[in-house]
Amino acid sequence: MKYLSSFFLLLLCLNSCKKEEKITQNSTAKDSLNIVKDPLSANVPLTVVPLNIFADKGKTVFSQDKRTMFFFDTQSNTGEININGKTYALDLLNFTDNEYHISGKDVKITATEGDFKEKTGDCLYGKFAGVKVELNHQEVILKDISVQDCPAY
């Protein structure tokens, strides 16, 4: 009997000390957080949204079909452009001959080969066949852009 009880005790101990089980199936449970896609990812084309801004002294306003696409206030050295519903600040404007180079964080605007008329009153008027807007290595060309540049001096 002594051997029999020892044998059962040994079986009980061995049974309770099982080795780790090997998991053969993958868990397919999803993370509880939703993945938010960047609205400006490479698959979404850039769209410049018109602004409710009008030409005034001290402002350089770029428009398409009489709608302001972006502007720069030369008195405060700030401007704005709205791309895909998000407003971006502009903080640098360079004008040379018939070109404008405007930029801000992640945004670069280039208007070249402008056709300027004589200065009328305090303002300079011109037209660009195309203006390139770049945001995070993506770009869009705005066609038939008019500029009204009215310095404050």
Image: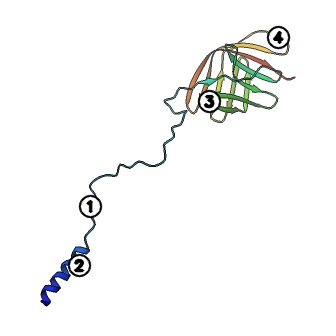
Pointer 2: residues within 10 angstroms few (<14), some, or many (20+)? few
* Whole-percent x, y for residue 152 in the image: 85, 23
SS type, badge 2: helix
Mark whose residue sits in front, 4 or 3: 3
Marks 4/1: CA–CA distance: 83 Å
Decide which of 120, 53 is in the foreground and name it. Answer: 53
**Marks 2/1: CA distance?**
21 Å
Mark 2 or mark 3, earlier in chain: 2
Of residues 71 and 110, the one nearer the viewer is 71
Which of the labelled discs sits on residue 85, or is there none? 3
Q: Residue furthest bottom?
A: 2
Q: Earlier in the sequence, mark 1 or mark 3?
A: 1
Q: Quadrant of residue 96?
A: top right
Packing grade of label 4 (10 A; few <14, some 14-19, many >=20) is: few
Which quadrant, please, contains the N terminus? bottom left
Of circles 4 and 2, which is in front? Answer: 2
Task: For marks 1 and 3, give the CA distance.
Answer: 52 Å
Q: Nearer the viewer, residue 8 or 71?
A: 8
Residue type, mark 2 in image:
Cys
Query: What residue is drawn where x is 25% and y is 71%?
Result: 18
Label 3: how many Cα within 10 Å (few below 14, some 14–19, many 20+): few
SS at mark 4 in the image:
loop
Q: Which label belongs to residue 13? A: 2
Q: Secondary structure at mark 1?
A: loop
Q: Secondary structure at mark 3?
A: loop
Do the residues under discs 2 and 3 have CB atoms within 8 angstroms?
no
Residue on which the image places disc 4 = 120
Image position of 125 with respect to 152: above or below: above
Report how far apart the C-alphas of labels 2 and 3 lie in the structure.
Answer: 68 Å
Q: Are marks 4 and 1 in contact (CB under 8 Å)?
A: no
The residue shown at (34%, 52%) is 27
Give the amino acid at mark 1.
Answer: Lys
